[in-house]
Image: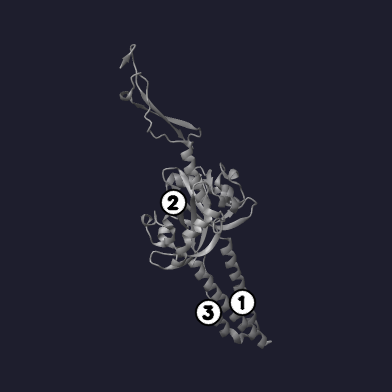
Amino acid sequence: DNFGGRTLLDLLIQSFPIPPTEGNPSKDTAIMIKNITGQKPPQCQAQQPSNVPVPTHEIMATKKDITLGILDASFDSLFVMTEQCIIEMVNQTSCEMFGWTEEEFIGQNIRMIMPKHVASRHDSYVARYLETGIKKMMGTQREVTAQRKDGSTFPCVLGLSQCKNSGLICGFIRNLSSEKEAESKYFEKQTQLYSKEIQLKQKNSETKEIMNALVKNQSMVMGILDASFHSLFVIDENCIIQMVNKKSCEDFGWTKEEFLGENINMIMPPDVAANHDQYMKNYLSTGVKKMIGTQREVTARRKDGSTFPCVLGLSETRNFGLYCGFIRDLTAEKKAASEMRAKTNELVRNESIVLGILNASS
């Protein structure tokens, strides 16, 4: 249409915030323009359809808060960094494990959590991977040493993966200190026994055959269990499963499609499942937390009906009516503990034999 020698067009204009990136740290806005001249009212004024969805900062912030709430419930430390090794995101466990606050982490190089001899070469490792595409650590889990804010170090398992199409690298870290301590105690006990064996050999050569038998009967020290990520379940206030991860499917035997929309009591033994919904109702009506915010050993049930011991950590995502649970399978640890007790009992019996021989030869 022409008005006064000019062509008037009705336009629909929408703006979208663009998050800052490595190459463009500024906060920009994208603008989309659509010609809707055919919808022009008689007075030649543009009218925007009321049903056009417009994304808002509130929706984006809500999704981010839910994601951070789930990650903060993890047993493991989480670090998300750029390809330049700059930390973009951490979870609460990272702050508790390393001693820095979230504000102190963000914007710093990830090498801040590494011993000096590793930190000095780390950026070149990442640069070599980006240049060659050869994966050495990416997609694997490996035992390394990490450093806290106070300078102390601890053994840990590091799992690395690259976030698709984002240019970000994600790392989960599990502290191995308690497992190493148990291993050290076993070594100490074994060393004491070996020391007594040497004393016995020096005191009486006739006991050589006995000592050889003791050595043959002793088992090698157990290796550290392979690190693994944990099963994740997100449920609503009605105990309906809203989200699971791949490890949940591997540990329990159901597919993701079979999990979603079902009651979380499907992974519980019948005697616990029968009362679980009531536990949730009691919490919602009283606000008294018994399991939420804690970690507790429980029993879980697989699709085939078999059960296994596990540690359940529960957390509530604020203001969203969602509850996040991380489940760590204790089957291997329980088996290891049983074997360790058996080995310790064997060491005690062997020690008694050695002491008896030493006393007899005095």
The residue at which mark 3 appears reads as 217
The residue at which mark 1 appears reads as 193
Q: Compared with residue 272, is residue 353 higher up or lower down, i.e. above or below?
A: below
Q: Compared with residue 172, is residue 296 higher up or lower down, i.e. above or below?
A: below
Q: What is the secondary structure assignment of the residue under circle 1?
A: helix
Query: Residue at point 44% right, 42% down?
Result: 166
The residue at which mark 2 appears reads as 135
Q: Compared with residue 238, is residue 210 higher up or lower down, i.e. above or below?
A: below
Between residue 124 and residue 193, name the one nearer to us. 193
Where is residue 197? Give x, y as percent.
61, 79
Where is residue 74? Give x, y as percent.
52, 54
Q: How far apart are marks 3 and 2 (CA)?
A: 42 Å
- Asked if residue 298 lies left or right of residue 351, the reply is left
Quarter of the rendering containing residue 204: bottom right
Quarter of the rendering containing residue 38: top left
Q: How many numbered markers are drawn?
A: 3
Q: What is the secondary structure assignment of the residue under circle 3?
A: helix
Between residue 83 and residue 127, name the one nearer to us. 83
Badge 2 or badge 1: first in the primary sequence: 2
Q: Say if mark 3 contacts mark 1, CB within 8 Å.
A: no
Badge 3 or badge 1: first in the primary sequence: 1
Q: How far apart are marks 3 and 1 (CA)?
A: 13 Å
Quarter of the image where the C terminus is located = bottom right
